[in-house]
Image (cartoon, rainbow, N blue to C red):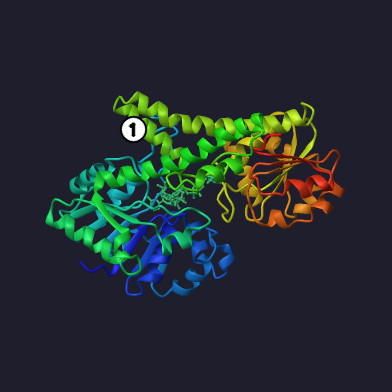
Amino acid sequence: MKIKNICCIGAGYVGGPTMTVIAKQCPNIKVTVVDINQDRIDAWNDNNLDNLPVFEPGLADIVKETRGKNLFFSTEVDTAIDEAELIFISVNTPTKTYGKGKGMAADLKFIELCARQIARVSKQDKIVVEKSTLPVRTASAIKSILDNTGNGVQFQILSNPEFLAEGTAVNDLLNPDRVLIGGDNSSEEGIVAIQSLVDVYANWVPADRILTTNVWSSELSKLTANAFLAQRVSSINAMSELCEKTGADVNEVSKAIGMDSRIGSKFLKASVGFGGSCFQKDILNLVYIAKSYGLNEVADYWEQVILINEHQKNRFSDKIVSTLYNTVSGKKITFLGWAFKKDTNDTRESAAIKVADNLLNEQANVVVYDPKVHLERVYSDLDYLKTRSVEENRELLSVESDPYRACEGTHAIAILTEWDEFKEYSWQKIYDSMNKPAFIFDGRGILDKNSLEEIGFTYYKIGLGK
Ligand SMILES: NC(=O)c1ccc[n+]([C@@H]2O[C@H](COP(=O)([O-])OP(=O)(O)OC[C@H]3O[C@@H](n4cnc5c(N)ncnc54)[C@H](O)[C@@H]3O)[C@@H](O)[C@H]2O)c1
Ligand SMILES: O=c1ccn([C@@H]2O[C@H](COP(=O)(O)OP(=O)(O)O[C@H]3O[C@H](CO)[C@@H](O)[C@H](O)[C@H]3O)[C@@H](O)[C@H]2O)c(=O)[nH]1
């Protein structure tokens, strides 16, 4: 079937950029991205492209090129569903915060609402594509809802997980390592549906990078990919602590092992801990699924990836406290960076949140500077933890829009995000304005130890032993 109209439900970090790139690469397909969040849709439609709800390098240019031509953002969900032959579901699937599986399982209520809405509205056969990350076997639940609540029309369910990383989303979408499409390859209708989606991607993705599998393999591959990626970060972070004790340098160890082609060099950068909306959520979900099948050893194995990550964040804040003579009470500590990685305004599960929370518990005065994260976001991240009152969070933590002002009179600087601009600062100027001794805690290993020590800083880098 030749696709002419695509609808995507969910205009978030995945739906927005993914559909923008599809619209660019497929000028003959009309792509409508819908969301129930009016503010988000308004922001996607804002004439000032600085106000788009998602910051990604290169994204605004493509939105400018396609919006109003074959790319539309709207809150008219029913109309967009009705018009489309193919519907992506790209809504959030957060960790459950209530009931059975609380703190572990994925909350599928938004997915179910979408399925019910598609069933209610559809008057013609549709292909429904899982773009959200979902527990393996969710497709059967979606199928059951569609078939039992629909108007007798036929639905084909595909799984097409998204592998983009934030900060590099546009490039990842334009040049994906692979596109994965799972579907019912045992029926003729299923094969036609799979081919329809393959044809969309074939507009720009080479055929050998479009992989088709059965639905369950596709669903499970997404969780597996994130588990393997996060496992590498936790593995190198575990080694970073041993490096600090033994005089090794984790960067040298990473390089040495990464040159082994069987290991590979990517995703071996020690850090203050991984963040982002996916890794923790998806591994917890994997652990929950394994447990639900009684696979306790499998569950315990993957849970360690999360436990090491928690440890890494805590040990970074502990290091700050112990180095500052075991007390940070009333001391100003400057955070450079709040986003979970560079080149994004996303802060979900950012290591900075936990490190700040720990330091606020010690009554530090934390000052935050991040080039892309706004003040309200920082406070809402902290308030969400409910560790202390909203007023106390505002008393103890402030946000600065100028990095030099953020560092004035501070006792210590902690690098929480690897923004490139941090490397370009006049560190002499910063040193001159700081309390002495002037400490830097580099949680991302991005600054040059020798030149900072020459200026007079006391410099700590994750994974660098003495
Ligand atoms: N963020 C990433 O980098 C990334 C990458 C790959 C996969 N994923 C997965 O993609 C999914 C979406 O992630 P995200 O980061 O884009 O989430 P998000 O929270 O940024 O966006 C989800 C959007 O869906 C909307 N929504 C929820 N229910 C709706 C409904 N019934 N009708 C219309 N709109 C509705 C919300 O208002 C929100 O704007 C998740 O399953 C996530 O695990 C995320
Ligand atoms: O060597 C590394 C690599 C990453 N990180 C950290 O790990 C986190 C996640 O980084 P990254 O994976 O680059 O960003 P995400 O946007 O979270 O992307 C991941 O999660 C997405 C959502 O599922 C997937 O689509 C992507 O393939 C997967 O990389 C960030 O805090 C990074 O700073 C490190 O500490 N060291």
Can the viewer see residue 381 in this picture? no
Q: Is residue 8 left or right of residue 451?
A: left
The percent position of residue 401, horizontal first and vertical second, equals: 72, 54
Picture residue at 34% right of the left edge, 43% below the top: 134
> Measured along the vertical axis of the image, is residue 84 above or below residue 130?
below
Residue 374: percent from left, percent from top = 64, 52
151 or 243: nearer the eye?
A: 243
Q: Residues within 10 Å of mark 1 (few under 14, many from 20)?
A: many
Q: Is residue 137 visible?
A: yes
Q: Nearer the viewer, residue 100 or 192?
A: 192
Q: What is the secondary structure assignment of the residue under circle 1?
A: helix
Question: In the rendered image, which quarter contains the N terminus?
Answer: bottom left
Q: Which residue is mark 1?
A: 289
Q: Please tell me in which quadrant of the rendered image residue 23 appears.
A: bottom left
The spot of residue 373 in percent (x, y) is: 63, 52
Hey, which quadrant is residue 178 in on the image?
Answer: bottom left
Dot 1 amino acid type: Ile
**Residue at 42% across / 63% down in the picture?**
175
